[in-house]
Image: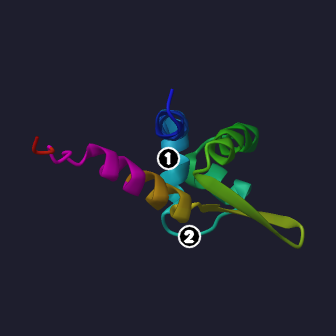
Amino acid sequence: MTDLCEAMNKFGKGIGSVPRYRIVEALFSGPKTVGELAEKTKQSQPLVSQHLRVLKETGLVQDERRGQEVLYTLNTEHTIRLLKRLSEELKPKKKRKT
C-alpha cells in the first residue's frame, strides 16, 4: 500500500464512525476539554477519551496540556496536507506525445 493510501486509510478510520465524527464536528468551533466534548456529543467521558485516542492516532486531533486541563483541537495542518496530496493524485495526468 502506498504512503498516501495508508494516510487516507487512517483518515477514514478517524472519521469513519458517527461518534468520532461528532467529536470532530464539535471541535470545529475551537478547542475543548474531554468534559466539554462529552457534554456536546452526549457521550460518557471514558468513551470520548477512547475516541480521542483513535483521532490522535490518525492525526486528526492534537492535544495540549494547559495546567491540569488537556485541550483538544483539530489538526487542520495535517488534514489540509493530506487532502492536497489526494487532490494532486486525482488530477488527470497529461499524456506524453511520442
Give the class, few, some or many, for how many residues have Cα within 10 Å of label 1's Cα (few <14, many ≥20): some
| Residue drawn at the location 10% of the way across and 45% of the way down | 97
Height in image: 12 above or below 72? above
Sooner in the amino-acid sequence: mark 2 or mark 1? 1
**Relative to the observer, which residue lies in front, 27 or 83?**
83
Q: Residue at x 67, y 48 (%)?
A: 56
Which percent across, then down, holds residue 6?
53, 34
Q: Quadrant of the C terminus?
A: top left
Q: Amino acid at mark 2?
A: Gly
Q: Secondary structure at mark 2?
A: loop
Residue 73 is tagged as none
x and y percentages locating residue 3 in the rendered image: 53, 38
Q: Does residue 15 sit above or below 70 in this rendering?
A: above
Q: Position of residue 57 (x, y in %)?
A: 68, 42
Helix, strand or loop at label 1? It is helix
- The residue drawn where x is 55% and y is 39% is 14
Instruction: Find disc 2 in the rendering and name its residue.
Output: 30
94 relative to 52 in the view: left or right: left
Q: CA distance from mark 2 to mark 1?
A: 14 Å
Residue 83 located left or right of residue 91: right
For the rendered model, the colour scheme is: rainbow
The relative height of residue 60 versus residue 72 in the rendered view (above or below) is above
- Residue that extends furthest to the top in the rendered view of this protein: 1
The front one of 6 and 14 is 6
Taking the view exactly as shown, the residue that stands out farthest to the bottom is 67
For the residues labelled 2 and 1, say whether their Cβ atoms are less than 8 Å apart.
no
Q: Which residue is mark 1?
A: 22
Q: Which residues are magenta?
A: 84-95
Q: Going 62% across and 44% down the picture, which residue do you hit? A: 55
Query: How far across and down, in percent of the image, does residue 93 sit?
Result: 20, 45
